[in-house]
Image: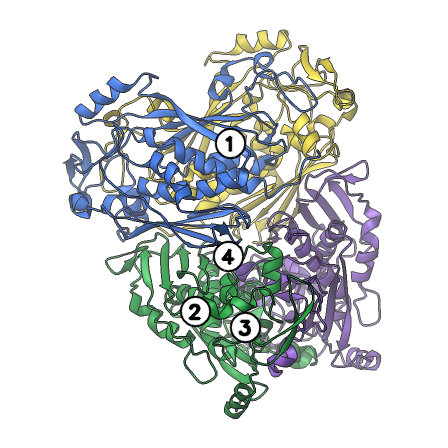
Chain colours: A blue, B yellow, C green, D purple
Amino acid sequence: MNSFGRVFRVSLAGESHGPAIAVIVDGCAPGIPLAVEDFAADLERRRGGQPGTTARREDDVPKIVSGVYNGRTTGAPILAVVHNRDARPEAYAELIHTPRPGHADWTAWRKYGGFNDPRGGGHFSGRLTAALVMAGVVAKKLIDPVKVDAHIVEIGGSADYAALLEQARAEGDSLGGIVECRASGVPAGLGEPFFDSLESLISHAVFAVPAVKGIEFGAGFAAARMRGSSVNDPILDAAGKTATNHSGGINGGISNGNDVVFRVAIKPTSSIGRPQRTVDLRTGEPAEIRVGGRHDACIALRAPVVIEAVTAIVLADAQRTGFQPRP
Amino acid sequence: MNSFGRVFRVSLAGESHGPAIAVIVDGCAPGIPLAVEDFAADLERRRGGQPGTTARREDDVPKIVSGVYNGRTTGAPILAVVHNRDARPEAYAELIHTPRPGHADWTAWRKYGGFNDPRGGGHFSGRLTAALVMAGVVAKKLIDPVKVDAHIVEIGGSADYAALLEQARAEGDSLGGIVECRASGVPAGLGEPFFDSLESLISHAVFAVPAVKGIEFGAGFAAARMRGSSVNDPILDAAGKTATNHSGGINGGISNGNDVVFRVAIKPTSSIGRPQRTVDLRTGEPAEIRVGGRHDACIALRAPVVIEAVTAIVLADAQRTGFQPRP
Amino acid sequence: MNSFGRVFRVSLAGESHGPAIAVIVDGCAPGIPLAVEDFAADLERRRGGQPGTTARREDDVPKIVSGVYNGRTTGAPILAVVHNRDARPEAYAELIHTPRPGHADWTAWRKYGGFNDPRGGGHFSGRLTAALVMAGVVAKKLIDPVKVDAHIVEIGGSADYAALLEQARAEGDSLGGIVECRASGVPAGLGEPFFDSLESLISHAVFAVPAVKGIEFGAGFAAARMRGSSVNDPILDAAGKTATNHSGGINGGISNGNDVVFRVAIKPTSSIGRPQRTVDLRTGEPAEIRVGGRHDACIALRAPVVIEAVTAIVLADAQRTGFQPRP
Amino acid sequence: MNSFGRVFRVSLAGESHGPAIAVIVDGCAPGIPLAVEDFAADLERRRGGQPGTTARREDDVPKIVSGVYNGRTTGAPILAVVHNRDARPEAYAELIHTPRPGHADWTAWRKYGGFNDPRGGGHFSGRLTAALVMAGVVAKKLIDPVKVDAHIVEIGGSADYAALLEQARAEGDSLGGIVECRASGVPAGLGEPFFDSLESLISHAVFAVPAVKGIEFGAGFAAARMRGSSVNDPILDAAGKTATNHSGGINGGISNGNDVVFRVAIKPTSSIGRPQRTVDLRTGEPAEIRVGGRHDACIALRAPVVIEAVTAIVLADAQRTGFQPRP
């Protein structure tokens, strides 16, 4: 389903080349100042335009349809909408019968019996992440003074990736990357043992972001190659401060008061200009496609603000449930 | 919360050194043959006893309290219980005020205001995974003929790890490992775009397993270092068969009919015999602890069957929801 | 929260005098024909204009923003919006500090700390039922050939109520009424024992409709005054057909294949022209108000199509979950 | 499904003539004193033994399997179990193929394909309400100082019903009744507009109780026959105190600080000694049954404590979610 959260709940709608992208944010506390201008900075971070990202131009000026009165949240559901202005559905017409490898074209066709909107990936488009970002803007206000900050760690396997990007784009190819996200100021006590561990909730939300294929908390996969005596974070005081943070700020599924830190693996953009093998769904015969249109050479470049958004959504929900830890 | 699933729902209860570990499995289809013997093989895989695992001896003979009549499931909730026979709570008494680094001791104490059961980790104990395994046995029956198989890929960074294990144990230390899980026969069409992507659901459930710190699907983190032209899986036919499986059997959050494959990073057992720095919660002063009792040198060795269980739980729920893909 | 349903899920947004009323319908099967014209008949039934209903004129022409392509549902979330064209927020300005008795004014002010949108009831307005009706139109298509039909049984205590209505309106007063709803063609097997009984699900949804204060299934409150030998419905055949339908088509929380029948009590419109005692929230002093603006003398007249809508929503969700009964 | 609640969650299991009835209560705050003795009074109220109730003797001494340590809740799930000691499954053997009119026999058989446990109603038995009562005992502690009190208003249509009961029992028949429930001390601000209105949540839980066929809040069905000028409760002060309580303490789905009051219609026990028409499921031919065994002549007599329990469960969950109203 396209919604997430128990008491702070986000519901998505929209298609890449339909009229709009929209999100309902339910369970937002009343009295929070909120204006369309508040969305600008994060939407700008998500937008195309940088080297390596799509040339599609969207104004991305959201409208707040409900849930705000006199400049403040009312406690009622917030409906925020971004209209699609630069849709060029014709660019994708040829792809309808030849699903792009690595994309959701085939699974969407199969699951929805061919009724899915295929234009630009339809509801599966990365453009839907604009809705996540808008919800994230609200969530970030709710979790203040907790701060969530995500940034690129590497692209194409390197921290110094400008030349790699240029080369990939020149060759009609794409690169993936790794994003690190850090939430600082997270109070101890968020998350639950077992099914609603903070790692469970964050990973659930992070894998909602298209192209994410992996997540690791703290030392993550490296911890699997270390010894317990090295991985265990020495506890320095009764407030839970640790000397190292191999746990990524979470023990037993519960935040321990240190920074929550995780890394996310983002695969290369699946839409590439190079020829790829696929099948013609009308005939069942092999086919070759080259994806035209405007695409990112590296979708990971636009991912950090989206990862921040879903993380803030999780924290906003988690802080509303569970018991309060003792002061 | 200690439950998971929308229409196939698993709820956990129990403590390491309380009377029993229990699980309610709700939403199981009626008419499925189920007997206590069916739990034996998977519980045995989870149990201690192998080199590198705890010396704690549990019979682990479950009782089916409800939901089964005349040897078959009735459609009513199944309550399965495993009694704790070999509890030695006194072994942990000294740890109550000196939380073990890397364990949930401190976060549980903080979140629950000191009222948590501290004996052997209480509700946070890895022993609770027996409840997950029991639910997994039921789930595996429901998803048949889909098969879920998990196995150790490496321990301490190596596929040939017998000597490493012996050395770590001799030194009172512990090792982590990596488990790979493969679900074969998964029909195309399971999972949803965005928040209920199959990766979201699986990762949510997998991070419910204690000591898991990372997950990656298909090529995972390696995909972040590849080019799109290499990562994209060529589509071979209209049934969605692909030449490679870098996607791990999931595109756009939806199963594509190829094997669902993922790897899980499991950190070293946090309870080790070597001295560790912690704090005395009574005084706030630094303290040093050595954890006695009976512990695994490598909890990852017991993890595969638990990873299988939570994966089967996800698939059993996912196949009951969503639309059926067209035949 | 403003959403309902496990796998067919409806989420509301909007205010009476804000820009629009909106609904996201998630989990709709793909391939269902859907056009804005399909909403017209039910929205018209809900609209003001009949004797006894508000003079507020709304075009109520919805827009389908997402989830429909080439005239059919795609399987993605459907966002439907009705813009508010005839908003006169100034009519309510005076009421902000003097909450209307029987209305949500005071509770909304209290719960949301005074940040709620007070214009015309804001998010609490009966106008939000337009969103329910739109979702109901989709749900009715999904449950076809099941038919849901609701109608007025009595107004002001009488089945022949034209004169009562006229008199109440002339006196600046309002009347309540009783709506009976019948779902025919409901297959046996919907609903669950205990918490998700079909009565639980229907009543949950029905009490989401403003002004509803009671519900009874089958013989309902009258059954409490009968003997078992009279209430029990004789079973006529193996298909579950019963000679009477005192159970309202539900036994043990599960539909039995007979019509599902229930009645709903709707209180009189709380906004009336007669003077009422309230409090001035600025001073805490007693105050008297007379509610101007345009109001229904009997909101119950517009309720049947809303009751149908929420019933269809419940059935659409219930038929997607649970086990299929054997044929 | 057999669970209820968003962050305070109750999950049921068990059958009338299986080994036990059980409940998992998840989301209980830590540090609450809880002992098996605490369950005694409410379980005693629910038990048979009074005139008009079943002669079945159960000790109903619960065991607390988990979630309590040193006499206080730990924050972990509480598993409470009541073993069935006086099961006489043979008394029901004859009924397996001739479903009792008014009971869940036929719907359970149909929904679960004949695999349901038919002994004494199996999972559909009123005996499961012992699990609700146990969860209610925990919930009542959590909502303190809010008090929930339910009592019989009438049986067989009369407040003075001793003779009616005696006569019905002598004739092998049964009576229904009406229970009124009052929650006092409920803070203003519980419940949400629309789908999670407090009426929605309470009615959802109340219809989980077997034999309930109607519910009305405040003036309820009578309100549908009154005028707005009479139904609207005059507001007396800024704290929301009202002169009357026709709203049952709820406006716009949200508690208004006055007592929450509702009445519940409970149909006559469906198991009666008088001959009834049914069908033989083996042959499809008409059949006549007389139900032997031990039954209540009036199940409503045992219902008040169960209604209290589910009401307390709703309030315990509602007070953990939503925003806090301003002081």
In which chain is the residue bearing label 2?
Answer: C
Answer few, some or many: residues within 10 Å of disc 3's Cα (few below 14, many 20 plus, some between 14 and 19).
many
- Along the line of sight, which residue is nearer the eye, A197 or D135? A197
Nearest-to-viewer mark from 3 and 1 = 1
In the picture of the structure, the residue carrying the numbered disc 4 is C2
How many C-alpha atoms fall within 10 Å of the one at disc 2: few (<14), some, or many (≥20)?
A: some
Q: Is residue D140 above or below residue D30?
A: below
N-terminal of the pair, mark 4 or mark 2, is 4
Q: Nearer the viewer, residue D151 or C302?
A: C302
Callout in the foreground (4, 2): 2
Q: CA distance from mark 2 to mark 3?
A: 44 Å
Report the side of C202 relative to D45 (left or right): left
Give the quadrant of residue A106: top left
> Mark 2 vs mark 3: which is more N-terminal?
2
Residue A70's place in the image compared with B185, above or below, is: below
**Chain ID for label 3?**
C
Q: Amino acid at mark 4?
A: Asn
